Amino acid sequence: MFQNTFQSPDGATHTLEILIMWLVAGLLGLLTGYVIWRLHPREYLSLKEQIRDLAARLRELEGEKGRLQMGNEKLAAELAEWKAKHQALLGQLDEREALLKQKQEALDAITNAADDLTAIDGRFPRYPFAAGRVKFKQLLKLYIQSRGFSIWAIKLIFAYILNRNSTCR
């Protein structure tokens, strides 16, 4: 059942032929290696050096990537903190704008209210508006137009304040 595989059906062995084919294949491999090593050794060595340099550069870049990721995480945390501060400041700004609006409305109500200056008629007869209804805003405008501390503007404002205090009691 088991026959010698190196024998042909006529009984001859082909062992020598097989060994010669292996020997020729091995010699062709050696010749190819010789051609590669002798004719192109510089290219091989330069490629080997490039591989070594690229491996070192890869390690450096991986280390730098780790440092940058840590820095990115720190910056993300800082950004979240600043966003929270920004929201808090926007809330404070809204509160202060509402307060400012209330105060502006109160100031407009005060300046637009008519002031009765008929009570000081006779004290300062030389002022043409002293006998009529005058707003405090007009007195301030007069004071500003006088360009400084003129005695008559100060007296008029002082009389106005005294008159308001006397009528409030």
Image (cartoon, helix red, strand yellow):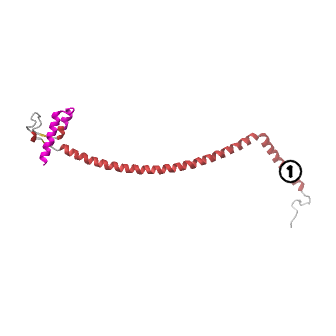
Q: Residue at x 85, y 52 (%)?
A: 22
Q: Name the one closer to the observer, 75 or 14.
A: 75
Q: Position of residue 36 (x, y in %)?
A: 78, 43
Q: Quadrant of the N terminus?
A: bottom right
Q: Magenta region: which residues? A: 140-169
Q: Name the one closer to the observer, 40 or 161.
A: 161
Q: Residue at x 67, y 43 (%)?
A: 53
Q: Name the one closer to the observer, 36 or 90.
A: 90
Q: Position of residue 119 (x, y in %)?
A: 9, 42
Residue at the right extreme? Answer: 11
Q: In screen coordinates, is 26 left or right of 83?
A: right
On whether residue 159 falls in the magenta region, the answer is yes
Q: Position of residue 46 (x, y in %)?
A: 71, 41
Say few, some or many: other residues with alpha carbon within 10 Å of mark 1 (under 14 / 14 to 19 / 20 or more): few
Going by the numbered disc 1, the residue's amino acid type is Leu
Snapshot quadrant of residue 108:
top left
Q: In screen coordinates, is 133 left or right of 86?
A: left
Q: Secondary structure at mark 1?
A: helix
Q: In screen coordinates, is 118 left or right of 52?
A: left
Snapshot quadrant of residue 35:
top right
Residue under pointer 1: 23
Residue at the bottom extreme? Answer: 1
On whether residue 28 falls in the magenta region, the answer is no
Q: How many numbered marks appear?
A: 1
Q: Residue at x 54, y 50 (%)?
A: 70
Most frequent secondary structure within the magenta stretch: helix
Q: Position of residue 147 (x, y in %)?
A: 21, 32
Residue at the left extreme? Answer: 122
Q: Residue at x 14, y 41 (%)?
A: 160
Q: In screen coordinates, is 1 left or right of 151?
A: right
